[in-house]
Image (cartoon, helix red, strand yellow):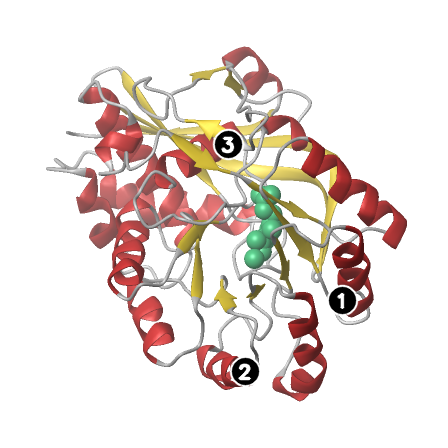
Amino acid sequence: MKIEQIRLRQIQMPLVHYFETSFGRTYSRDMVLVEVVADGVSGWGEVTAGENPFYNEEWTEAAWLIVKHYASPRVLGRELASADDVYPLLSHIRGHFMARGGLEAAVWDLQARRNGRPLWQEIGGGARKEIACGVSIGIQDTVAELLKKVEKELADGYQRIKMKIKPGRDVEDLRAVRQEFPGIKLMADANSAYTLDDIDHLRKLDDFYLMMVEQPLAHDDIIDHSTLQTKLQTPVCLDECIRSAHHAQQAIDMGACRIINIKLGRVGGFAEAKRVHDVCQKANVPVWCGGMLESGIGRAHNVALSTLPNFTLPGDVSASKRYWKRDVIVPAVETTPQGTIQVTDGVGFGYGMDMEFLKSITVREETLS
Ligand code: OSB
Ligand code: MG
């Protein structure tokens, strides 16, 4: 296939409720969408970078420039044998995996559409027709609000609760939730807010029989996590640290984690996400699909990814309405009362585009050809 056009769009979407992590609050998303066109057919991708370079080094403005000036020129007008060709074409770019991944995922979606197949089938998924959903709950102003939020998500059927934690908002918050909900699948995500100096403090998390603690230490430090894991009963799950299958292999070999969160963007797209998945599967390390407050496009891609066999734990992929009043796809992503998302058999990412709404929230658009 030969990509004739790449259209970049920046859209702005206010969140239904702000989302607070150890690195700050997000009230509204500002994201870059990538549309690739060949023979009149469009494939869609989403750059999952945040509005600020706080989760990792990427952010919306930088991602726009990387896709425009470095990623697109390598793909545009080139005869691609497969979407698998995109990752190596972009690997001369250091970092910026989310920017690269937005374009790469769009080419996978296009390839699926050209073949008249669902995206999940195109990437070799299909191990399940229904994916298990958890939710990620941001840091709340008060413990009472946190408990109310947990109760609501459980009532909506979600199978696992993840709480964001940071120093000063960890042990007491977790104790309160555990006391109120003794039997639930519970985990905590620190987004790199601690250091090895906090080992004694982090050991208190073992009291709450969490499924895992996600990325407690520095975003780029697998070595310190391997030290921490030997001192914790709670399994460590790595998020920020794992940007490639090679990282995943090293982290597993070092005993730095027992679970890995795979984010499509963070590893540069579907090809590398599958390689991370395969490394983990071989090592008997379960994985789950992380989220980045995606629009429906990124969300649908996450659903497809979650059908690979080793995605055996509930992910952070949940209903559109938890984030958006109106989503850019139709229908919106919905969950069943059992806390699952039913995988669609539609071609490509399996949902339609709400172009009218998309246009109304587009703040910048550029077509490269
Ligand atoms: O660490 O998983 C994370 C959101 C933004 C940045 C980082 C993370 C998150 C989430 C939200 O946890 C997951 C979601 O609901 O999309
Ligand atoms: Mg995380």
In the rendered structure, are the residues bearing label 3 and label 1 in contact, judged by CB atoms less than 8 Å apart? no
Q: Is residue 203 above or below residue 212?
A: below
Q: Nearer the viewer, residue 66 or 104?
A: 104
Where in the figure is residue 79, as x and y percent of width and height?
A: 12, 35
Q: On the picture, is 144 further left or further right than 222?
A: right
At label 2, the amino acid type is Leu
What kind of element bears circle 2? helix
Q: On the picture, is 99 further left or further right than 236?
A: left
Alpha carbon of mark 3 to alpha carbon of mark 1: how far?
A: 28 Å
Among numbered discs 2 and 1, the one appearing first in the sequence: 1
According to the picture, the residue beneath numbered tag 3 turns out to be 340
User: Outermost residue, top direction?
Assistant: 356
Figure label count: 3
Where in the figure is residue 323, as x and y percent of width and height?
A: 66, 33
Crowdedness of circle 2 by 10 Å Cα count: few (<14), some, many (20+)? many
Using the image, tell me which numbered label, if any, was put on residue 121. none
Crowdedness of circle 3 by 10 Å Cα count: few (<14), some, many (20+)? many
Q: Is residue 272 visible?
A: yes
Crowdedness of circle 1 by 10 Å Cα count: few (<14), some, many (20+)? many
Alpha carbon of mark 2 to alpha carbon of mark 1: how far?
A: 17 Å
At label 1, the amino acid type is Asp
* Location of residue 173 by image quarter: bottom right
Residue at horizontal 71%, vertical 77%?
204
Residue at horizontal 48%, vertical 29%?
341
Q: Is residue 365 visible?
A: no
Residue at horizontal 66%, vertical 80%?
203
According to the picture, the residue beneath numbered tag 1 turns out to be 170
According to the picture, the residue beneath numbered tag 2 turns out to be 228
Q: Is residue 249 above or below residue 332?
A: below
Among numbered discs 2 and 3, the one appearing first in the sequence: 2
At label 3, the amino acid type is Thr
